[in-house]
Image (spheres, rainbow, N blue to C red):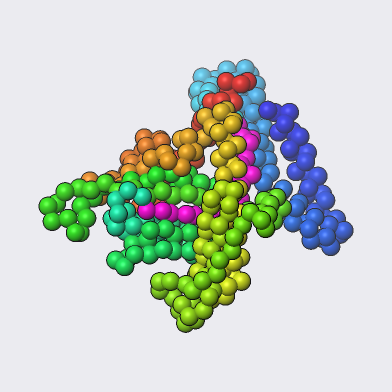
């Protein structure tokens, strides 16, 4: 590990030196690549420098302890030594986490799909609430939300909604939201006061960059244009602006109607289709890589029940990490950072465990 850290430290110094060269400043593509690499390495380099200083402090304390004869000073040096050793362990663990293989999709924007499952109208109402949950969370992170498609029901629910969240690190935090979300509560239409259970499914997919080769053959796709349905602004419901794509090999159907322009809806539909195809590739790869699957939170299966929202008890339980929080109102308003942080910590702990077993 430490040989690799020394190599990264050398590389970091090389980047700083190259960034100071006039030729790099005039090459925007190279400049951006170096700045990105510097940004990625900075946390590791800073932690390693602190670790090296800490190890030096330990050596200095040991040397002083050997020379010191006064008992009071020896006690003080022992306290400093114990604190430095504890910090060294913390830094070593932190460095191991920083050196874990990074998900190449972590820095990407995301496309989120929410679908109502079992529970009829109640599931659709909950889907709409979870959509607003993610919108509020994105706003708290100063991310941009753009709706791609929504299939609403008359009472304020959503059978399905697709939307894009644009922002630094969006996928790295929201990827843990994929799976089945279950709600337990008494519907407003329930006169007997019985608790009903409904479900929705959430899929979080990284936006597909242009450099990722997702080939969609013309013969494999059908493009239908039609008049948009549901609520819309001027011209949305009066022109054939909505676009539906059908991908024959996979059976995937996507629909976009939120824009006034047919071209804009077509672009959104293709972006969603590419994300779904890329996500399907990723899922197949995860199925084939058992070691990777074990290093992740849950199985990664879209049908896996990951979370329960119990309204009568005011609690939310994440079943993958056995975390229960009694602040349902805040969570439904977008305060999910504590859950996300716990998922990240559990994911890192599992990966570290595998790394230690392989060592």
What residue is shown at x 60% (from left), y 36% (from top)?
Answer: 285
Quadrant in which the N terminus appears:
top right
* 353 drawn magenta: no
**Can residue 155 be seen in the rendering of this structure?**
yes
Picture coordinates of residue 226 (x, y %)? 51, 71
What residue is shown at x 76% (from left), y 34% (from top)?
Answer: 7
Nearest the camera: 143 or 54?
A: 143
Residue 305 lies left or right of residue 168; in this view the side is left
Query: Which quadrant would residue 334 be assigned to in this image?
Result: bottom left
Residue closest to the far right: 23
Nearest the camera: 24 or 245?
A: 245
Picture coordinates of residue 355 (x, y %)? 59, 26
What residue is shown at x 49% (from left), y 77% (from top)?
Answer: 236
Quadrant in which the C terminus appears:
top right
* 108 drawn magenta: yes
What residue is shown at x 58% (from left), y 23% (from top)?
Answer: 356
Nearest the camera: 112 or 257?
A: 257
Residue closest to the far left: 192
Residue 201, above or below 240:
above
Tally of marks: 0
Residue closest to the far bottom: 234
**Can residue 169 be seen in the rendering of this structure?**
no
Q: Which residues are magenta?
A: 93-116
Picture coordinates of residue 161 (x, y %)? 44, 59
Residue 306 lies left or right of residue 217; in this view the side is left
Picture coordinates of residue 349 (x, y %)? 51, 31
């Amino acid at each position: 590990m430490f040989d690799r850290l020394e190599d990264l430290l050398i590389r970091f110094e090389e980047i700083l030196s190259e960034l100071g060269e006039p030729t790099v400043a005039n090459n925007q593509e190279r400049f951006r690549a170096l700045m990105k690499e510097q940004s990625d390495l900075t946390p590791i380099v800073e932690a390693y420098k602190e670790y090296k200083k800490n190890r030096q402090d330990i050596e200095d304390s040991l040397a002083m302890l050997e020379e010191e004869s006064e008992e009071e000073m020896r006690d003080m040096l022992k306290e400093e030594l114990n604190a430095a050793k504890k910090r060294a362990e913390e830094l070593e663990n932190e460095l191991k986490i920083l050196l874990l293989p990074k998900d190449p999709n972590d820095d990407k924007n995301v496309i989120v799909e929410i679908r109502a499952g079992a529970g009829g109208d109640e599931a659709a109402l909950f889907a709409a609430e979870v959509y607003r949950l993610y919108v509020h969370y994105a706003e708290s992170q100063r991310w941009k939300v753009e709706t791609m498609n929504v299939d609403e029901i008359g009472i304020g629910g959503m059978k399905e909604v697709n939307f894009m969240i644009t922002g630094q690190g969006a996928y790295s935090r929201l990827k843990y939201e994929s799976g089945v979300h279950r709600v337990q509560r008494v519907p407003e239409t329930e006169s007997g006061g019985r608790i009903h259970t409904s479900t929705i499914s959430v899929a979080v997919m990284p936006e597909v960059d242009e450099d990722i080769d997702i080939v969609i053959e013309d013969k494999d796709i059908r493009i239908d244009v039609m008049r948009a349905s549901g609520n819309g602004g001027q011209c949305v419901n009066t022109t054939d602006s909505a676009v539906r794509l059908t991908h024959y090999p996979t059976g995937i159907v996507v629909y976009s109607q939120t824009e006034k322009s047919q071209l804009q809806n077509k672009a959104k539909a293709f972006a969603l289709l590419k994300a779904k195809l890329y996500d399907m590739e990723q899922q197949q790869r995860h199925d084939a890589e058992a070691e990777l699957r074990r290093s992740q939170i849950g199985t990664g299966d879209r049908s896996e029940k990951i979370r329960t929202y119990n309204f009568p008890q005011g609690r939310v339980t994440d079943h993958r990490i056995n975390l229960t929080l009694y602040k349902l109102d805040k969570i439904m308003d977008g305060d999910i950072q504590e859950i996300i942080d716990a998922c990240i910590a559990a994911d890192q702990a599992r990966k570290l465990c595998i790394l230690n077993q392989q060592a």
